[in-house]
Amino acid sequence: MKILTEVLNKFAFEDIQSFAKEGKAESVQLDYKKDFQTDEKMAQLITAFANTRGGVIVIGIGENRSNGTPISWDGIEDGRHEERVAQIMSGIHPVPAFEVYKTNAVNNRVFVLIRVFEGDETPYYPHNDSNLWIRTGSIKKSVEIASPEMAELLYKKAEKATLARKQNEKLATFNYDCYLVNREKEKKREAVEEASRLQIKEKPIEKNKTILEVLFQPYFPHKDFVKPQNTEQIIQDSYASNAVYSFPIRDMWESVDNGMIFFKDIDELICQQVFANGLICSSHEISRTTKRGRETHLGWLTGELFITLKGAKTYWRDLVIKVL
Amino acid sequence: MSVKGLNDVIINPIVGRITSSNGRISIFPNHSWDIKIDTQILANEDKIKEYVTEITKLVHWSFGYKDFQNQLSKDYLSEKGYL
């Protein structure tokens, strides 16, 4: 069961029981609790998730303390658990983005799922607690106090993420520009031959073209989720299309640093890039020449944005599943 | 999201349930929009459609078209197979 990648409100009591029986161990992004702990302990756990990579806490599953796998899955007594979570959150500063969901009750027992998102206002800390907590992924000690170096990193996390996103954007632009220059050279060679035959002048590729670029990437860029070689299959499986666009396109992709690229300049200019760290970029010509001149329709822009997002969503989901 | 190469390009907006063919020539050569989307929206296709419609409204505004009607335009975009 894809508890880390799906919306929480689709899971029923029986789904969580089945999930527990799969025996998946706790990890950096997954924690089991047989029942609610004290507000202080819960606040430490939640801030640790928000300070690290986010994740899901399942309350109602007891874990084996030596290997982190579930050993009991009886749920907890039904009650006003959402209010309890809200109360815990009020003891945290700043309050991280979170979702809380209580399954249907079976024999008055429920599971409570809390998803905490990786925060962009780090560090998060419990009130009346001078420590900063982080998630380690270790079974024995899953939550620990951040070292001074780690604390410094948390204070600079948003700044570092902004820099990393800018670097990613530069990478995608650099690739696109290189392919464009290469195509210009090819065209020039073709055009020189054609021009000498027909006595016409060649045009640079981007001239008289309107290019829509859509670039998405994780808010907190991490290292590669998978090896770049493994992105090819995920790209093929993520195909989405509508009346105006397809993403990722089903064609011959080429390998580049940390990902893959598709570039074509026949009939229309199109460049799509997909990377192992979740960065995706689509550049496509969206203007047509008519008797009124060069025109574009904002509906095309919407269609391309939607389909790029739809393809990206599947790509990201499959990327994350591969590492879970 | 960004658009470049808009010099002398006619930008046709969505007006109600049609694409207008009386668009104006773009004043700016380039445009860019900072888009943030979270996993709660991504997990639900209807929410993605709502979100993309909101972005479309923002784009219309940027190009000087301020009368974008969300529901009518969303219906139109769905009928055309864009959403």
Image (spheres, coloured by chain):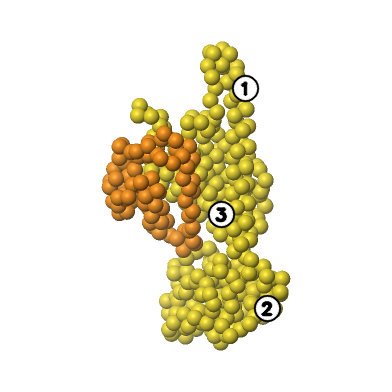
Chain colours: A yellow, B orange
Is residue A55 or residue A318 the one in the foreground?
A55
User: Which label is found at residue B46?
Assistant: none
Name, please, the residue furthest toward the bottom: A38
Q: Which residue is mark 2?
A: A145
Residue A289 position (above or below residue A65)? above
**Chain on which label 1 sits:** A
Q: Image quadrant of residue A118?
A: bottom right
Nearest to N terminus: mark 2 or mark 1: 2
The quadrant of the rendering that contains the C terminus of chain A is: bottom right
Name, please, the residue furthest toward the front: B27
Residue A130 position (above or below residue A222)? below
Query: Residue B83, image x and y in percent?
Result: 38, 49
Is residue A302 or residue A15 the one in the foreground?
A302
Residue positioned 59% across, 43% down in the render: A173
Horizontal relation, residue A248 to residue A69: left or right: left
Nearest to N terminus: mark 2 or mark 3: 2
Q: Is residue A55 visible?
A: no
**Dot 3 amino acid type:** Gln
Nearest to N terminus: mark 3 or mark 1: 1
Sort mark 2 into few (<14), some (14-19) or many (20+) by Cα contacts within 10 Å: some
* SS state under label 1: helix
Cα separation, mark 2 vs mark 3, equals: 30 Å
Q: Which residue is mark 1?
A: A189
Sort mark 1 into few (<14), some (14-19) or many (20+) by Cα contacts within 10 Å: few
Residue positioned 60% across, 72% down in the render: A123
